[in-house]
Image (cartoon, rainbow, N blue to C red):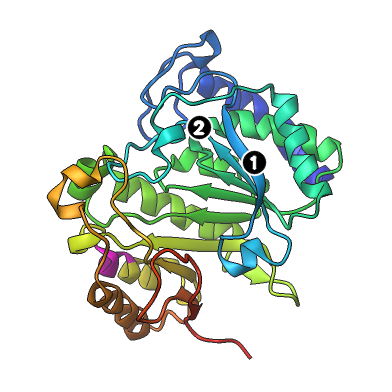
Amino acid sequence: MKEKMNILKEKLSIFKSLLESCALCPRECRVNRLNHRTGFCKAKILPAVYSYAPHHGEEPPISGTRGSGTIFFSHCNMACEYCQNYKFSQQSNEREIAINDLSNIMINLQNIGCHNINLVSPTHYAAQIAEALMHAFEKGLSIPIVYNTGGYDSIDVIKLLDGIIDIYMPDMRYSDDNMAKKYSSAINYVRHNRASVIEMQKQVGDLKMDESGIAKKGLLIRCLILPNNISGTDKTLDFIANKISKNAYISLMSQYYPAYKAHAIKDINRRIAPAEYKKAVDKLHELGLDNGWVQEAPFDFDIRFAGHNIKPKN
């Protein structure tokens, strides 16, 4: 961890400068968060943590047998109309904590046996997380760090995280900017998302697991299928196959349900149909994307990863 600590020490001043005129995400609100100003995401200077605990519902290499050390951050730099976590991502429900307390949370999760530290919705707190990680490494943090992001990231910030993050777990939510703007208020999502994922792949490569099947390093891409082809998953899969890696690990997610404001929006006021999911699975096979996780129809939409590997490993 000494190498990571040295990297962080060199970069903390750059992260801090991004908070002085906030440019941690593509919105570039340019507010001075060091003076407690807030932008689109409403995040302040101290990290707001909604909850932390071992999580057993992530993809199998992330949750493993002892759980993923998940830290859910309040606020979000996206504003999804269908957000399942809206109570703490979009509504005022926060508990700000000191940077040192965040580092202690990481150590505690390691001490109870979690396989990794899973940073959920970290984008708007990337600078604070970097400082907390430096302290945590000083205290003996040694398990992999997972950057679990909605995918609306700044490539400049992702580049700053090079050598610090072990596992990137981004969403690739949309392949059409109009859909991203309409349903998540995310301007130019596709360009920023794809550039960031390319950089993530460059840094960590394809997902690598130990002899027990626990992820140690690499990229794991999540594709949430939305009703009526709003996500444009087929085009996203084309991009992954042609620009990322044929060996990319993909989690093809079927668990969408109409939460938050979605009940009032016709096109997203339903779960996806089995035929919609099958179309995405067929596209995976057509492209030869054989690593990752799918569910087999009939499937239980409420059980996130009750399915099977796309290509079972011997």
Q: Give the range drawn in magenta.
A: 232-236
Q: Where is residue 186 in the image (x, y as percent from the top left)?
A: 29, 39
Residue at disc 2, secondary structure: loop
Q: Position of residue 285 (x, y in %)?
A: 36, 84
> Residue visible at 47% across and 65% down?
304
Residue at the extreme bottom of the image, as rendered: 314
Work out which quarter of the rendered image holds the C terminus and state it: bottom right
Q: Which of 276 and 138 is in front in this view?
A: 276
Q: Specify whether residue 68 is painted magenta.
A: no
Q: Please name the residue that numbered disc 2 is placed on.
A: 74
Quarter where residue 50 is shown? top right
Does residue 240 appear left or right of residue 216 in this picture?
left
Mark 1 closeness class: few <14, some 14–19, many ≥20 residues within 10 Å:
some
Q: Which mark is residue 173?
A: none
Quarter where residue 267 is shown? bottom left
Q: Which amino acid does label 2 sit on?
A: Ser
Q: Is residue 171 above or below residue 133?
A: below
Q: Position of residue 7 (x, y in %)?
A: 72, 39
Mark 2 closeness class: few <14, some 14–19, many ≥20 residues within 10 Å:
many
Residue at disc 1, secondary structure: strand
Q: Is residue 307 above or below residue 112?
A: below
Magenta-drawn stretch, dominant element (helix, strand or loop): helix
Q: Which mark is residue 52?
A: 1
Q: Label 1 to label 2, Cα distance in Å?
A: 11 Å
Instruction: Say whether disc 1 or disc 2 marks the residue closer to the N-terminus.
Output: 1
Q: Where is residue 145 in the image (x, y as percent from the top left)?
A: 67, 50
Q: Which amino acid does label 1 sit on?
A: Tyr
> Residue visible at 48% across and 77% down?
307
Does residue 107 appear left or right of residue 308 in this picture?
right
Quarter where residue 132 is shown? top right
Residue at the extreme left of the image, as rendered: 266
